[in-house]
């Protein structure tokens, strides 16, 4: 369960993200690898030159390196991927599921497919789901998302380790073009001078794998589980067809169950750091009871809102007869996998500039969001696809790779998509963080109305699927 | 291997065009009689090592290249040059002389029309200051028809003619149908003609 960070340490750094990144970045210097630096000598005397360097080999960084390597227009470019950790590869699938999963949108799947990673993932394991039910703890309003007639999948739940293994395999198949340096922690970036007389000729594509990009006061990486305040775990469900994702908004934060297999799901619970600690300390049986209770309990509903929303629902059904959804009952949790609880901190952040001379921010380096809409890594993969296309266009036009025109186009295109998404997620988070009657009524009626207007729902699904 | 020559005057923007052509594989020679322009263009090009052997600059007028480099270029680019040239026919004949038979001449320039006066002189120079005042002399602008006639006199056949429009808000050029203000054309050399001295 991902925890909402307490106000004192909540990183509401809209508009301040990039300066923070720059400060911490200047404090480091390159410790290994052979990328060219302005002043330092390279590893073996003469610094090596790469056309593109991707800093950070997480999900988005590896996908970026892979996408660039597979792009025919960029076939002459020498690409380097720097990863501070060691090579992440599952030699065989473990029997138990990992507690770090992502909900990949169809858009992300398209990207992974274009680099051959999706085929690798299909030989391992993933779980598609066709429907999502989202409802309120404080009222009976609900909204369901699904594609028409349940024909197409809404999204895909994949363990992060599985995606990483697929990406690692694909990177190895293009190792002539993409060089990967593991255990290479970047400790210093030296940016080119602002004037055109710069000597610096390599291209930095910087993506946050937090070990390298964040300063000492930042919360810890997504990948490491033993850091601070979030929570993720798995549950074993009563056997039903497990093809629906569930999310309930509680005033303390949303709780979601994402299908992993027929009887196993991944749980993501956002709450305050204090509550998260309590949940971590509970015994497994008490924890299971806590989960079932929040999914099933109606104790937070008020009569007033219930009456108002059912009146609204009747009114809606007069105008839009097909406007209401059948309420499915969420599954009950039977048990949890031992030792699978973990926490990680949440944050909201956005860089005002995604680009600078010869530098591009991709993925979490540019933006961090609340996981309630499952969009974090999907926004990152969207960045990768957009950057790959624009770099390819730059080569086609005979431009330099670091050409400001093309980099600015990337920034415009991605900010236009990412900012509204982040705004919507943040508004939802704030709107559902309260149990004030007026707001509960407002959001319940709003939710019901949205649920009733199919074209609007289809637009939302289409937007989130990019 | 494609050889391209560019007559470049008052125009550092076209050095980006030359760099792009060089990166795409052409062997490019940039020509400008003004020493400062050459120095700036060379400095700019020096930043990209990929251009080293493919792009060179000469401080000379187009006419000076003629006896030595006659018929040695696949393409000649005269971008935003013609509106500053007084002896246009002679200039175009020189460009034609540098071209191999079947080679292409690319010209972008401004048309001598009232629309061009309003937009290029009044708006761009005086009001919006996109270019310094006095950069252009409207009397030196040439209409597409006049240019086509001159090119045919010089043994070049106009293949393509398109209008261009600049949006100062978005800083983007786009192709448009009307050729009343800025336009671009491609002409192909189809037969040999004696070149003037």
Image: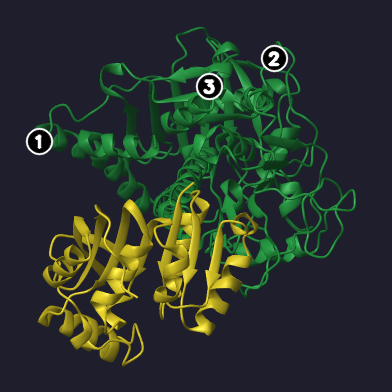
Chain colours: A green, B yellow
Q: Quadrant of residue A123?
A: top right
Indicate which label's residue lies in the foreground, 1 or 2. 2
Inter-mark Cα distance, 3 to 2: 21 Å
Indicate which label's residue lies in the foreground, 1 or 3. 3
Say which element carries label 1. Answer: helix
Q: Where A209 sits versus B184, above or below?
A: above
Q: Which residue is mark 3?
A: A118
Residue closer to the observer: A45 or B156: B156
Say which element carries label 2. Answer: loop
- Label placed on residue A96: 2
First along the sequence among labels 1 and 2: 2
Q: Which residue is mark 1?
A: A319
In contact (CB < 8 Å): disc 3 and disc 2 = no
Chain to which the residue tagged by mark 2 belongs: A
In contact (CB < 8 Å): disc 1 and disc 3 = no
Say which element carries label 3. Answer: helix
Q: Are marks 3 and 2 on the same chain?
A: yes
């Amino acid at each position: 369960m991902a925890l909402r960070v307490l106000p004192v340490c909540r990183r509401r750094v809209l508009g301040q993200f990039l300066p923070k990144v720059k400060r911490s970045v200047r404090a480091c210097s390159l410790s290994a690898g052979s990328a060219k630096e302005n002043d330092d000598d390279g590893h073996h005397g003469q610094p090596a030159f790469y056309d593109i360097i991707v800093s950070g080999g997480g999900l988005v960084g590896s996908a970026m390196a892979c996408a660039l390597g597979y792009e025919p227009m960029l076939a002459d470019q020498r690409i380097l991927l720097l990863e501070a950790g060691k090579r992440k590869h599952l030699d065989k699938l473990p029997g138990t599921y990992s507690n770090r999963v992502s909900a990949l949108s169809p858009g992300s799947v398209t990207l992974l497919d274009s680099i051959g990673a999706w085929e690798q993932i299909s030989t391992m394991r993933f779980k598609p789901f066709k429907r999502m039910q989202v409802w309120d703890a404080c009222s009976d309003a609900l909204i369901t998302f699904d594609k028409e007639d349940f024909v197409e999948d809404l999204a895909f739940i994949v363990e992060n380790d599985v995606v990483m293994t697929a990406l690692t395999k694909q990177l190895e198949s293009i190792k002539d073009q993409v060089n990967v340096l593991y255990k290479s922690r970047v400790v210093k970036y030296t940016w080119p001078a602002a004037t055109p007389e710069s000597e610096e000729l390599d291209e930095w594509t910087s993506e946050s794998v937090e070990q390298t990009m964040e300063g000492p006061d930042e919360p810890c990486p997504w990948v490491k589980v033993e850091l601070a305040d979030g929570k993720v775990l798995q549950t074993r469900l009563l056997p039903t067809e497990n093809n629906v994702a569930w999310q309930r908004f509680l005033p303390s934060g949303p709780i979601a169950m994402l299908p992993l297999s027929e009887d196993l799901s991944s749980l993501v619970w956002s709450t305050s750091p204090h509550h998260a600690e309590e949940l971590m300390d509970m015994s497994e049986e008490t924890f299971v009871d806590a989960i079932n209770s929040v999914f099933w309990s109606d104790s937070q509903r008020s009569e007033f809102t219930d009456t108002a929303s059912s009146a609204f629902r009747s009114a809606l059904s007069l105008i839009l007869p097909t406007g209401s959804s059948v309420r499915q009952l969420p599954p009950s949790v039977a048990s949890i996998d031992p030792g699978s609880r973990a926490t990680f901190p949440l944050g909201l952040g956005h860089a005002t500039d995604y680009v600078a001379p010869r530098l591009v921010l991709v993925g979490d380096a540019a933006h961090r969001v609340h996981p309630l809409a499952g969009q974090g890594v999907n926004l990152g993969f969207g960045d990768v696809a957009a950057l790959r296309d624009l770099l390819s266009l730059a080569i086609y036009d005979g431009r330099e790779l670091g050409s400001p025109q093309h980099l600015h186009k990337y920034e415009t295109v991605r900010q236009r998509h990412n900012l509204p998404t982040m705004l919507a997620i943040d508004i939802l988070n704030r709107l559902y963080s309260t149990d004030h009657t007026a707001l509960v009524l407002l959001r319940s009626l709003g939710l019901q109305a949205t649920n009733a207007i199919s074209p609007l729902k289809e637009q939302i699904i289409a937007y989130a699927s990019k | 291997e494609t050889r391209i020559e560019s007559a470049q005057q008052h125009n550092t923007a076209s050095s980006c065009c030359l760099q792009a052509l060089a990166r795409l594989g052409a062997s490019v020679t940039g020509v400008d009689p003004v020493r400062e322009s050459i120095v700036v263009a060379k400095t700019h090009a020096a930043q990209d090592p990929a251009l080293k052997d493919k792009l060179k600059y000469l401080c000379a007028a187009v006419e000076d290249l003629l006896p030595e480099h006659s018929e040695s270029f696949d393409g000649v680019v005269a971008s935003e040059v013609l509106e500053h040239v007084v002896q246009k026919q002679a200039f175009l004949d020189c460009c034609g002389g540098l071209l191999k038979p079947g080679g292409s001449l690319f010209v972008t320039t401004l048309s001598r029309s009232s629309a061009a006066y309003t937009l290029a002189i009044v708006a761009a120079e005086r009001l919006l200051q996109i270019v310094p005042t006095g950069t252009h002399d409207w009397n030196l602008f040439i209409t597409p028809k006049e240019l086509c006639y001159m090119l045919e006199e010089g043994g070049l056949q106009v293949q393509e003619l398109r209008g261009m429009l600049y949006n100062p808000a978005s800083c983007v050029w786009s192709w448009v149908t009307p050729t009343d203000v800025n336009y671009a054309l491609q002409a192909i050399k189809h037969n040999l003609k004696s070149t003037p001295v």
